Amino acid sequence: MTRDRSLDIAVTGVCGRFPGSSDLADWWEALVEGRVLTTRYDMQRLRASGVSRALLDDPDFVPVHGHLADADRFDNTLFRVSPREAEMMDPQHRLMLECAWAALEDAGRSPLDTALTTGVYASASGSGYLRAMVAGGGLDPMTLEDAVHGNEPDFMASLISYKLNLTGPAIAVQTACSSSLVAVHTAVQALLNGECDQALVVGAGVAYPQAGHLHVPGGIHSASGACRPFDEHADGVVAGSGVACVVLRRLEDALADGVEPYGVVLGTAVNNDGSAKAGYYAPSVGGQEAVIRAALEAADVDGASIGYLETHGTGTRVGDPIEWSAASSALRAAGAAPGQVAVGALKANTGHMDNAAGLAGLIKALFVVREGVVPPVAGFTRLNPLLDTEDSPLYVPADAAPWSGPEPRRAGISSFGVGGTNAHVLVEAPPAPTPRSDEQGEQEAGHLALLSAADGEALTRSAERLGRHLAAHSPAPADVARTLATGRAALPERLAVVGRTTAELAERLVTGAAAVRGRGPEAGPAPLVLAFPGQGSQYPGMALPFARALPGFAEALSDCLGAFEPGLAGELERPLHDPGFPKDGLAQTRLAQPALFAVGYAVAAALRGLGLVPGAVIGHSLGEITAACVAGVLGLPDAARFVTLRGRAMQDCPEGAMLSLGCDEDTARELLAACGLPLEIAAVNSPDATVVAGTREAVEEFDARLTGRVATHRLRTERAFHSSLIEPAVPLLAAELSRTAVHPPALPWATDDGRLVLPGTEVRPDSFAAAARDTVYFTRALDSVARHLPRAVVVEAGPGRTLSALAEAADLTAVPLAAGRAARPEDVLTALGTLWTMGQPLDAARVCDRGRPVRLPGYPFAGPRRIAPEAVLRQDAARRVVEADPAAALPESAAPGGQPASPAPLDAPAKVAGLWAELLGHGEFAADADFFALGGDSLLVTRLARRLGAELGVRVPIRDLLLARTLGRQTEVVTALAARAAAPGAAEAG
């Protein structure tokens, strides 16, 4: 029977910072190879970390830990956190922020995207960092308050939500070692209940300092410093530090967005042992078995379909047999065959990462079912003889092997917390990716890759790392562009690069060649000014670069052409799209002007659709009409009709010519006066660019006279625009305008007489007729714009870069969209990327909409080391901190340095009774008082043994105190131990 998949949850993103590995790929390789990733510290390193000499000299101190490199680094700038605030924040909370960011990027979601309601479910181990600050004694009341907010678990989930602007539930989940897997269960329920669309589950277990542990004979911590789950040599657990995060979504939603999950969560369950066990800290067969059964039922799968179990696997003498028995019973009852389920135990590789352990195990299991490879249990030699193997579905793999279990590949993950909160999760291999239907190879338009970072150095690292990844893995370039556009936050420092292939993108990212870099202004994006060129900038096929690279352009062009009379619209199609159309044909004014208007209008509409809304418009000659239409002064049908008439009327005017001079207006007038030729000033474009117009003969003679005196350039036109030769067209234009509705502009509009017409200002219709004859004072229009919008960025909305050069000459920033007469689609993309690097609100998702999300390197975290002065461990505080840290100091051992040379006078009854009073909080005790009946537990017995050993100079086995129970019998035990220790030769015999 087919399972109902409506309740399945996809794991769309992961992040893990684990001991002994640089990234998850490195970590997975180490797991497959069965490597132990814990670190045995040398004494010099531990002393440098602030660990006290007394602790280091303790014979029971084991200097082994799953060391997390750079745990004190934090990219505080990215998260808008001051250096001092960063110092006061628990390194666990800092790393959780970075992992949350990285996991969202891995899921193809921008960490600052608010399109999905995202919940945060977070857990962290007790704060050794806060304990260090308190033990150091340097916190005043106000600083202590800051330290509490930066270190206590109550605030970690809401801190992540605040820094990432996430609006779903923000919940701290604290159930000791099982916390992060319980958080997965909680997040899954929230997704199924509709409380959020996406869930971020993050867990941290980072010791401070990362040092080692104190071993107690019979305790849970390893004397050898090696964690060997289910092994005959197992002697306890080793602590490790790590941070892990997963992103969860409903499977149906994730697949609809084109996300390829790491795997699928089929079902989860959580319970508690209750009191049916040996003690509060003891595990329970019944509770663990029940939670596995419940998860199988929730997933609607049977034991026969499970091929892998990632266990809690602490390597303890009590815990391993109980877990083996519970899992065997649950899976056997659910249909699993003997020897069917391979066992995994991550703690053998990395140590026990405390609150992050459950998530770390989940990530490992996801890799197992996704890759179809079962790693060995690191260091495994032979099965623990205490394990019940008869008909057990479980077996321990000693070597890596291909998946041999049932299909589809399914795995279980167990995590059990001190106190009895158990969690179990069932996962399945991801569904097969859907076949690609779109073309993913080389695209004529190219692909735009956008990168950003909080600072320039991070941006450089990010570009180089991404380039190397692309060169090594060759993902489809469209997928790269789409992922970067939609799955990354837009940060201040920005880079854009265009390439047709993945190889081109890779090379340009690594070398920086053809890359555009910029920084978004802190004051927000500069206002945009759209500048529309006039006649002379046209060329055959000029619509092609925009049509191929500018989303929305083709549709807007079609709408615009539809506003022209059908005959002309059909006549314009070929010169707009065919580079082979004769240049002389498009030079005809009757075609050139409608063609330029259509392209400019369509570019403006497309840019607006991409979020690039102009703050003002400006145009040169014909471009003034395009600008007026975009500003709302003329409706599109009226503008199209007027441009059509204007082109025909000017075409019917006498032929003429135009000459550009490299000088200012006054110099041009002096030159004209000196030559006496019938020429006029047609345009003043900049302080050193003036255009004259007149008959062809006059222009040619004037040009010849100026040789060597002023730079000149003949314009490509057959009419003398903005001169008396155009006057025959003016009455026709005025007559048409008398029947045309003209409106006040909706945004500032710079006219060619140099005025800036503000919104709401009345416009005279006949001004458009006069403008065809009058001199174009484009330099004045630019000055008006610059005064009104001093930070403006001018975008040339049409072919060429003539207006961009004029804007730059006026000290304005300019970006031509399609510079040159051989403009390519890549040029348009580069221009869009340039605008994005300037901080413009480009809708990058629309520009890069052809691919689907893929996994690419995320943010290159490499922040500075941040340790508060108050947390720097001093020799007098270090021991208290380590002894207070459950990950480092429990169970505790005998006194540091071994037995004192001169033990204190023995007063065992008083010492035992006094410590009972201190640990239990009671006053007086009868000899038959029961330690456990009065509220004691195995943790307090461990502390009792440690304190007795330290104060009386004897080694007190925890097992002896557990069996003794009463005050009288425990006193007898201690008295006997002290007597033996004081006997002659005792020291030598020990």
Image (cartoon, rainbow, N blue to C red):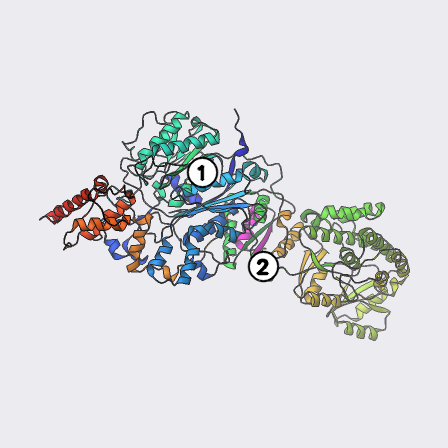
Q: Which residue is mark 1?
A: 367
x, y percent for residue 212: 30, 49
x, y percent for residue 492: 56, 58
- Residue nearest the viewer, comparing 83 with 483: 83
Is residue 212 shown in magenta?
no
Judge whether residue 812 can be spotted in this image: yes
Q: Which residue is mark 2?
A: 518
Residue type at numbered disc 1: Phe
**Which quadrant holds residue 849?**
top right
x, y percent for residue 294: 43, 31
For the point 27% across and 37% down, the residue is 233
Is residue 506 shown in magenta?
yes
Between the residue at mark 1 and the residue at mark 2, the CA separation in whole angstroms equals 39 Å
Judge whether residue 16 can be spotted in this image: no
Among numbered discs 1 and 2, the one appearing first in the sequence: 1
Asked whether, in this view, residue 739 is left or right of residue 906, the answer is right
Residue range (magenta): 494-513
- Residue nearest the viewer, comparing 121 with 227: 121
Q: Which mark is residue 972?
A: none
Residue type at numbered disc 2: Gly
Q: Give SS at disc 1.
A: helix
Q: Give SS at disc 2.
A: strand
Q: Residues within 10 Å of mark 1 (few under 14, many from 20)?
A: some
**Which quadrant holds residue 720?**
bottom right
Asked whether, in this view, residue 793 is left or right of residue 364, the answer is right
Q: Is residue 362 above or below residue 783?
A: above
